[in-house]
Image (cartoon, grey):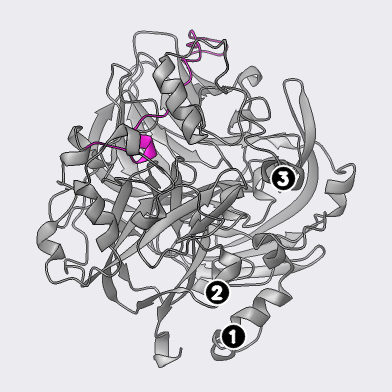
Amino acid sequence: MSTTPLSDRFAIDRRKFLTRSSLAASLLGLGHALPAWARGSHGGTMARKGSDVLSGEHLTMTVADSSFATASRHGPAVTVNGTLPGPLLRLREGQNLVVDLENNSSMGTSIHWHGLLVPFLMDGVPGVTMAAVEPGERFRYEFPIRQAGTYWWHAHTLQEPMGHYGPIIIDPANGDPHQVDRDYVVMLSDWSPMDPHVLMKKLKVGEAPFNFQKTTATDDYPLSGAERRMWARMRMMPTDISDVSAPLYSYLLNGHGPEDGLEFAFNPGERVRLRFINGAAMTFFNVRIPGLPMKVIAADGQDVRPIEVDEFQIGNAETYDVIVEPTGADAFAIVAEAMDRSGMGVGMLASRPGARADVPLLRDPPLLTMADMGMNHGSTADSMDHGGMDHGAMEGMDTGSSGAASGTMDRSMDMDSMSMRDTSLLPPSVKVGPGVDMVSMNPVDRMGDPGIGLADVGHRVLNYRQLVSANMNPDMRRPTRLKEIHLTGNMERYMWSFDGQKFSAVTDDPIRFAFNERVRVKLVNDTMMAHPIHLHGHFFELVNGAPHGHQPLKHTVIVQPGGSAQFDLTANEPGDWAFHCHLIYHMHNGMFQVVTVRPLQGGEG
C-alpha cells in the first residue's frame, strides 16, 4: 500500500496520473498492446466453478491466469483464489476490512468494491483512484464496512469479463429483518473463449458483428413492409438489442453453464432468499422461476417494500434480493434469459438431488419499438405519466441545459419527418460530431418500463416505479439544481460517450459537485440501446414517484433506449468517482466520466 501522505495524493495531477497508469491506456482506448495471454495460449490451472467463502477482517485475494470450460467451450479465464466467480466475501456491518490483493496474473488488475461506501482511494479504479496493480505486485485495501446488503466486487480492467468478479454479502449489525430458512447467492455472468481485446476490436471494425438475429428478406419477424422500409431508411435494425450474445457467450449462474446441473436445495414450504447479482460484462437478463412468484425485498443492497412479481429484468451491475417459498413440486427452474433471447442461464431449485423441472424454451426475439427510438408520440401511459417527476421540487432550479430536450415533449410527430439524426434537438452542452449518430426525438421518462421485450408477456414484471424504499432516506432536502447528461453514441463506429465526448477528450474536465450538494441528475438516452449507468461511491435516489423520503436507493440505473431517467444525489462522499455505463465495451470505448466532489476533508481541492 502506498505510504504517500493523503494530502499529496489528492494533489496528483490527473493527466500525469493517467499517463503513468498502464490501465488508463486501456480505459481510454489507447495503446492496445495485447498482453501475453491474449497473443497466445493462456496458462494456468482449470478454474473451479463456484465461490469459496472468505470472512473476517484480513483477507487475501490472489489473481491468476487460468482456463475455463463449460459444455463444449474451453478457453482462457482469470480467477481469484482459483474459482470463477471468485470468493464470496461474507462480512458484517461495522467491521473493518483489510484485503491484500496479490497479482499472479499476466496483466494489470484491481478490485472495485461495487456499491460499497469506501474512501475514494480504496475504490479500485486504475487511472482514477489508483494505478493498476501490475503482475507480481500487491496492494492493500483497507476500509470500514458502513452498510449491509448484497453487493459484489470486480476488476476494473478487461480481466472482469474473464472471471475476475465475485459476490459480497454484508450482514446487518442489528439482525436481519428478513427471516429465511436458506440464503443463496445467484451470480449471473457471461463468459466467452474469445479474449476481450479481440472481441472489442471486432466490435470496432464491423457493424454489429455478433448480432445473429438481424432481419433478412426471408425472416418471420412480425414486421410489415412499411415498417421494414422505415427501418431501412433509418439504416437501423429493430433487432439491435445486444452487442454480444449467445453465439459467443455462455450464460453462467455461479460459474455454471446450463449443462452443468447447478442445484439449490430446499425443503417444501421453506422461505428461500435468492440474491441475484448481474456480474455480466454485456448481458441484461430476464429472470423468472416458472410457477413460483418472487417477492422482491431489496434492490442494489437496499431494502425496499416487498413487491411480488413473476419476472424482472436485471441490468449489468444491478442486484435484486427476492424471497420464494417453493412448494407443490420437486423442482423449479431458475431461468436467466438474455434480453435478446439468444440464450439463457439455468439453475434448479431442487427438493432432492437430481430433481428437475421443465426449462421453458427461449421466447421469440424482441423487436425495438418507436419508444426505443425516442419516438414516443406521447400516446402511452409512460410518456404522459409525469408521476416520477417531482415538479414541486423543480421550482426555482437552475435547469441548465435541459431546455432543448424538454422542448421536444410537445413536438408534433410526423412519421415522414422523423429523423434520429436531427442534432438540432440537442442542447449546447452536447458536442456534435462523428461520435453522435442518434438523437432521441422525444426522450420521455421511462421509469415505468419493465425493459425491452417485457411489456406484453402476460404476467407481473417489475419496473422501477414499483420500488419504494423500506426506510426513510436520511436527506430530505429538495435538489437545488438540475444536471442533465446525454448518453450518446455511434453504433456503426462503436463509439460511446457522455454528451458527445469520449472520456479521452474530457479527462481534465470532470463532472463537478460541491460537497454535500443536493442535485437532481437527468440522464437522457439518445441511443437505441439500454445503458446501465453506475456511479461509484454513492447511492442515489431514483425519482420514480415514490412517497417523499422513500425514493429507492440505487447505485446503478438502467436508462431505457430513447428515454430518460432521473435521480437525486447527495454528494457527500468527497473525492473522484467513476461514472460510467456498466456494459464493459461501452465503458472502454468512451462512455465513462469522473464525478469529482469537492472540497475534500480539511478544505483541500
From this viewpoint, which residue is outermost toward the left?
392
Q: Nearer the viewer, mark 2 or mark 3?
A: 3
SS category of the residue bearing label 3? helix
Q: Residue furthest front?
A: 416
Quarter of the image for residue 318 reads top left
- Picture residue at 13% right of the left edge, 63% below the top: 393
- Circle 2 is placed at which residue position? 121
Identify the amino acid type marked 3: Pro
Nearer the observer, 203 or 346? 203
Name above or below for residue 492 compared with residue 184: below
Q: As drawn, is 249 to the left or to the right of 134?
A: left
Which image quadrant is residue 527 in?
top left
User: Does residue 64 belong to the magenta stretch?
Assistant: no
Q: Which residue is mark 3?
A: 196
Q: CA distance from mark 1 to mark 2?
A: 9 Å
Left or right of 10 on screen, residue 325: left
Q: Which mark is residue 9?
A: 1
Quadrant containing the N terminus is: bottom right
Front: mark 1 or 3: 3
Q: Which residues are magenta?
A: 349-377
**In terms of sequence position, does the residue under pointer 2 or pointer 3 come before the other?**
2
Q: Residue furthest right?
A: 40
